[in-house]
Amino acid sequence: MAADGGGPDPVTELTESLRLSRRELKLVRGRQELSAETLQRVRRQRAALGKQVDLFSDMLAALLSEQYWAAQPAPRRGLLGQSRGRTDEQDLVAEVEASDLFDGGWYLRQHPEVAEARLSPALDYVRTGHAAGREPGPRFDTARYLREHPDAARSDVPPLVHHLRNGVA
């Protein structure tokens, strides 16, 4: 009570209010720490899952490539016994797959419809992907390449293959 007897002491009220505020602040800080720990755990889990997705998409790309090549007929022999070699499409797929600028796992992650269609990523890129504007990998910018090399747009090969065959940086 106040010294004059007219109600609660303001100092006592403020002291009690400060005590309650400190207690509430302590609870909020505890929740904040718990949330920060949870967020860190979720970030670590996300990073681990991201690595697994990368690994699985790389494995799927390799498997789809193997299936493509296994389904190709064996090279035929000509009349004189010489090998008639691969088709133009097979040559293009082989060139794309051999390039360090092509990343089959990345391609599947960017274009999941290709994985759903169970197509080799390189085959999809050769057949329709490049024409649809799909990038062959994170290190090759098709639009930029076509701007800098307009003859590539008129070529009968995908821009990445044009780059590989012409040795243009």
Image (tube, rainbow, N blue to C red):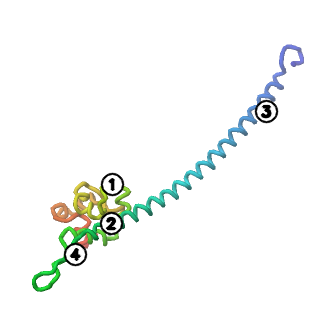
Q: Which residue is mark 3?
A: 19
Q: CA distance from mark 2 to mark 4?
A: 25 Å
- Residue 72, given in percent of the width and then of the height, sits at 23, 70
> Which mark, residue 116?
1
Left or right side of 116 for 157: left
At 34% across and 70% down in the image, what residue appears?
100
Q: State which quadrant residue 134 falls in.
A: bottom left
> Which mark, residue 102?
2
Label 3: few (<14), some (14–19) or many (≥20) C-alpha neighbours in 10 Å: few
User: At numbered mark 4, what does the secondary structure look like: helix, strand or loop?
Assistant: loop
Mark closest to the chain's N terminus, 1 or 2: 2
Mark 1: which amino acid? Glu
At 56% across and 56% down in the image, what residue appears?
44
User: At numbered mark 2, what does the secondary structure look like: helix, strand or loop?
Assistant: loop
Q: Which of the image's four quarters has the N terminus?
A: top right
Mark 3: which amino acid? Arg
> Which mark, residue 74?
4
Q: CA distance from mark 3 to mark 2?
A: 64 Å
In front: label 3 or label 2 = 2
Kindly give the residue lying farthest to the bottom in the view shown.
Answer: 80
